Structures are given as C-alpha cells and as structure tokens.
Image: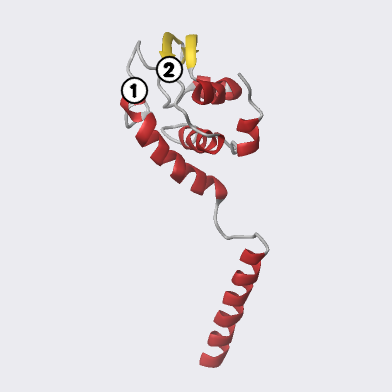
Amino acid sequence: MKFVIAFILVISALLDIQLEKEGYTQTDPLKESMERGSEIYTDFCISCHLPNGEGVENVYPPLAKSDFLVKNREASIRGIKFGQQGEITVNGKIYDGYMAPLGLDDEEVADVMNYITNSWGNKNDKMITLEEVSNIKK
C-alpha cells in the first residue's frame, strides 16, 4: 500500500513538472492578478479612495459597490491608465474632480482593475487582461 501511495505521488509530481514546462499551471490567474492589484492599490490609491474603497463623499468617488466601474469598464481603465478629469456620476452622485495619471504600466492597470472590480461588493466575471488595457488609447 505504501508503495502505491509513493508511486502516485511521484507520478503526480512528474505530471505537474511537465504541465508547467508546457505553460500550464494550477494557479488562478485572476486571484494572482488581484493579489498584485491589492499591493498597487495600497501604494497608489488608498490615500484617496481609502482602505475600504468608500472614497471621500463629494471629493473622491467610491470604488466600493460602484455602478460606474460596472457600467463604464473602458472609461474606468482609461481613468487609471491616463488619469481622470471632469464630471462622472457614481452611485447617483456627481463627482467633478481630477485624478492625476499614476504612471502604471498596462499590466499594473489590469491588476488594480481586477482587484477593485472584485472587492468591496463589486463582482467582475470577466477578467481584465493586459491585452484589453493595452488596446485602450487616450
């Protein structure tokens, strides 16, 4: 019996090595992106949008339970990628402020978008990819 268990473990390890060589992993790409995005959020976004994503009423729009993120996916990506200026409506309230460009590369933009669109009551079923972000122009 011990031999059978050892044999199964060896075969399993060999299969994992072969799959990784061929580019397959057992990791969850969205989860990994969100973990990187959480770090980016902490470094660049938390001071205005706060740890809970609620923002500051009438100053910085909320990211938590944000209808803007859901309804305006491309505009949200563009705002993080290039900065945001002018009027936007979030959860029925008008915000007319300025967010400077953060200087993030396209992968960082995708990661932070995956984090905020899947945190604080937000749910995004379609992962934001590097390709999607790189296709968005000013």
Residue drawn at x 42%, y 13% is 98
Residue drawn at x 35%, y 12% is 59
Residue 71, percent from left and from top: 58, 21
Q: CA distance from mark 1 to mark 2?
A: 10 Å
Crowd around label 2: few <14 · some 14–19 · many ≥20 (10 Å): some
Q: Nearer the viewer, residue 32 or 78?
A: 78
Residue that mark 1 sits on = 48
Between disc 1 and disc 2, the foreground one is: 2
Judge from the rendering whether residue 4 lies leftward or rightward of residue 54; answer left or right: right
Judge from the rendering whether residue 58 lies leftward or rightward of residue 6; answer left or right: left
Residue 119, percent from left and from top: 44, 35
Q: Nearer the viewer, residue 47 or 26?
A: 47
What amino acid is labelled 2 in the image?
A: Met
What amino acid is labelled 1 in the image?
A: Cys
Q: Nearer the viewer, residue 28 or 37?
A: 37
Residue 100, percent from left and from top: 43, 19
Q: Nearer the viewer, residue 83 or 10?
A: 83
Which is nearer the N-term, disc 1 or disc 2? 1
Residue drawn at x 57%, y 75% is 13
Q: Which mark is residue 99?
A: 2
Crowd around label 1: few <14 · some 14–19 · many ≥20 (10 Å): some
Task: Report the residue that reaches farthest toward the front.
Answer: 103
Would you place residue 81 above or below residue 12 in this image?
A: above
Does any portion of residue 1 appear in the rendered image? no
Asked if marks 1 and 2 touch (Cβ < 8 Å), the reply is yes
The secondary element bearing badge 2 is classed as strand
Query: Quarter of the image containing the N terminus?
Result: bottom right
